[in-house]
Amino acid sequence: MNTKQMRRALTEFATNSKGRKLDPVDLLRRTDMQVDWETLSKLAGNSIVNPRQFDRETVVAIAQLAALLETRNVEMKKPLDGKIAITAFFEASTRTRLSFESAVLRLDGKVLSVPDGQVTGIAKGESLADIGEMFNTYGDVVIMRHPETESVDEIQKNLERPLINAGNGSGHHPTQALLDWYTLLKWRPELSDRSCPSEKKIHLGIVGTPGSMRAVKSFLRLSLMFVDAVSKITLVSEMADPVGLDLTEPIEESPIPIEITNDVQEVLPDLDVVYVNSIAFLGDSYRNLDSRYGLDASSKLKPGAVIMHPLARNEELSEDLDDTVHNLYFAQAAGAVFVRQAVLAAVLNRLDRISDLC
Amino acid sequence: MNTKQMRRALTEFATNSKGRKLDPVDLLRRTDMQVDWETLSKLAGNSIVNPRQFDRETVVAIAQLAALLETRNVEMKKPLDGKIAITAFFEASTRTRLSFESAVLRLDGKVLSVPDGQVTGIAKGESLADIGEMFNTYGDVVIMRHPETESVDEIQKNLERPLINAGNGSGHHPTQALLDWYTLLKWRPELSDRSCPSEKKIHLGIVGTPGSMRAVKSFLRLSLMFVDAVSKITLVSEMADPVGLDLTEPIEESPIPIEITNDVQEVLPDLDVVYVNSIAFLGDSYRNLDSRYGLDASSKLKPGAVIMHPLARNEELSEDLDDTVHNLYFAQAAGAVFVRQAVLAAVLNRLDRISDLC
Amino acid sequence: MNTKQMRRALTEFATNSKGRKLDPVDLLRRTDMQVDWETLSKLAGNSIVNPRQFDRETVVAIAQLAALLETRNVEMKKPLDGKIAITAFFEASTRTRLSFESAVLRLDGKVLSVPDGQVTGIAKGESLADIGEMFNTYGDVVIMRHPETESVDEIQKNLERPLINAGNGSGHHPTQALLDWYTLLKWRPELSDRSCPSEKKIHLGIVGTPGSMRAVKSFLRLSLMFVDAVSKITLVSEMADPVGLDLTEPIEESPIPIEITNDVQEVLPDLDVVYVNSIAFLGDSYRNLDSRYGLDASSKLKPGAVIMHPLARNEELSEDLDDTVHNLYFAQAAGAVFVRQAVLAAVLNRLDRISDLC
């Protein structure tokens, strides 16, 4: 399939309604439309729980496959035929749950859905370890969100199926970080190269507290792997020690210079990418980020700068940015289903049904 | 397929357990088993939000297709193959949600279900406009129920997929009105003709307050289009001004005479059809209609009169009517899935897979 | 398909992670790999509401079919193609709901899910009889759990589709009892024979109160049918009259000697099978069984004794038993999906699509 055919196929798919629209073919063209199947095949049967399990090659390979899936209608090959995914959302999240379930259905898999474990569930005191035991015969992969960080270890005590962590307390949210980097690689494909030219490298600003925000933590963890693409990271947080224990060592070991500040307005004119997050997980409840850190159309952004946000947003990200070229967050959301398709196809060992199509 | 074959096919399908049983072939025979595909094809890609978007021809065409679907097993042709419907019930309604989901599954489409948005959902403060943005890549059509009337406008800000409004606050519930008229057209097929003989015309009584009850409002709005079929409409309400702003103009412009009263017992002996509804949407909560307006087996109904009710019911409709010939409300419920199938096939532009079967 | 092929097929399926692992072929070998299709075919179109409707032959036939399904990948034949199951859990139970839904999906049927009727549902006051009327056109079989014992009679007033009772108040839970006996028959296949040798017969201990615990009641009801397999039943309960009205007569009529005690430790060394349950249904809430009745790795169990538990568990069953040979409860859980597949295929009259494979 050549580039022109791919572009034509692409037009059948929905993309974001506003902001920058990204063409996945731009990323695929970096590798002459090739996907790194060998790297992807190593994910077969594996759980996806923490971004530290990845390396840069794997992140790029997943992005390539997501791009391929975004340009092709693969349903005819029924890549997940006969496979059942359990979406166990013990912490409710309509958006993330539907994103995963859409990915499963688009690949012709089936879904067992737990839309809200706190309500529909576990009132009789069942342990997560016992639930994991049950899931062994119910499905082929478990996608879990849970308010407690330890939940991932707990369910894996007896679970013998791959687990995809869709957010565990203040822990991690690896597929969010993968789709964040999918967005960046589509936006500026040179970032996928070992030889990224210096004028294409990005100064990355992260507004939030990685230590207590799982999406920010996972995104920062992956960003540290892109040593040829990221010239500098600036963390903007009101916290004294925003990094947290998990990332202290990776940050120290990374060649990427990292700066911490508490004034977003001051650094804004120098940032190429501003990653914003509204939701901090603090103990058992959520707290909005201080509204001082808010962005709107009057913020002093670099002309070509892009804003990312995992959504849902609060006041920190004004709707008056939606119709501007700074809005990369809608494109980011639009890529989510394809990254999750890529992860599921790799984990469930069904890459052969997709590679056939190339 | 001839009438006899159709009747035979019909017997495979379930219908209501009690009350009048309707044969969809009676309606199809008015047009020599033809469906008005041309009128239906204009719905492709359109949202279904307010009955005012329809005309009489479209309502009849949808009823014809529903009748065809009620007589045929169309699943082999997989009319909605590869299509995903999102049922976003931000106001919970098990019955209506399952009715839509059954329609999708019977046509071999797939479902992403939000069984209760108030619980499973939107606690993080996500706006409906942002949710609409997400839904663009999750599915192919969105079926939404929401307690707020403005929700339909709100989600459509960014949503680029067709929206089917399954009830928005005190707004509208268009597919309910379509299935109400499907019931009437099956019951008395002459009502579908421009030349309905006068002895077949109906005096329609509506017990309820269209201004604040979405199902009643949508049913009245469609009824005003059937100028050759409805000889008179009597509104029975305890409210001083039951009509509400939306319908003031359509009522003034309609040639159908409309009377308003607050005494159901007085008009009952003259009504051919009594449409009852139990539930008034008043601000943010529901209120039962005054029990004085109740019907039971001792009510002074015309011998051939039929009672309709969108259900769920309360005391206004006694179970002692269930086993009588006045019970059209069970047949009304039994037709729901087929009307929703018809709407979905038209909106998702898959009529060709059904018309092949004729 | 011969025994060797079956064993090979089996390895593709998951089983329990810990405790005894059971091979379904051991049961099938008792009948030279034959399933009693004739007995199973009598279930077509029937509701499954109370274990008293079964006889020993039917329980064994269901276990044979479950064993066959556990050894074979039958999905290619799409046994439930075109069939829709409604899982109406008016009392939430994630585990049981997913078990049934997995069974439907594994047979290629479709699911309409009500994950929590108390939340998503029935706030408008709809009666179960009216809901049953609706379900007639929504699906082909209804699987219901409900906190009220009368719910089964109530929904069947208008429902014309088969009902599978997945637990009704303090009533019954017949598929749980079927899977309990499936476990026992896999564990000791001689129990399926009329001529079970006396050294293979079991002394069965049941810790719990059948009168108020539906799972225990249903298990005891089935156990009374296995007169050639059960040498004695000992009921361990703190209640003065643990049996309850439903089972008084079946117990009096059974040739199996039944003893009642309140001291589990005393009888433990003599039991071959200990059936434990944590949850007593008392009025409208749940109460844990007295912790005095708890089992752990230090309990004086017979060397070959096995423990069963329908799960979820509380303190009455310690996790330190999980890794022992006494743990039959994980194997019991692992068989649940296959028994439910067998019941669904029989009730929905699709046995022919499975028997083809033999």
Image (cartoon, coloured by chain):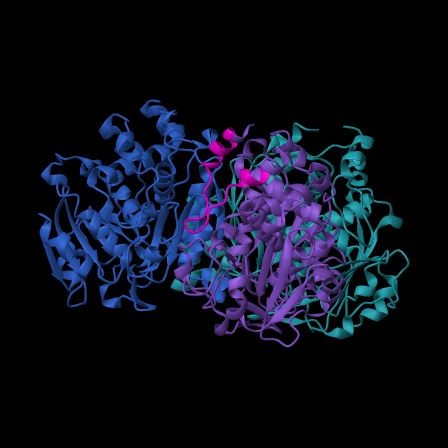
Chain colours: A blue, B cyan, C purple
The x and y percentages for residue C265 are: 50, 69
Residue A111 in view, yes or no: yes
- On screen, residue B131 above or below C121: above
Extent of the magenta region: C4-28
The x and y percentages for residue A111 are: 49, 45
The x and y percentages for residue A223 are: 19, 47
Which quarter of the rendering shows the N terminus of chain B? top right
The x and y percentages for residue A140 are: 44, 43
Q: Is residue C11 magenta?
A: yes
Residue B136 in view, yes or no: no
C65 or C124: nearer the eye? Answer: C65
- On screen, residue A35 above or below C166: above
In the displayed structure, does residue B194 sit left or right of residue C333? right
Q: Is residue A290 magenta?
A: no
C192 or B39: nearer the eye? Answer: C192
- On screen, residue B292 above or below A251: below
Point 27% across, 38% down: residue: A186
Q: Residue furthest bottom?
A: C240
Which quarter of the rendering shows the C terminus of chain B? top right
In the displayed structure, does residue C169 sit left or right of residue A267? right
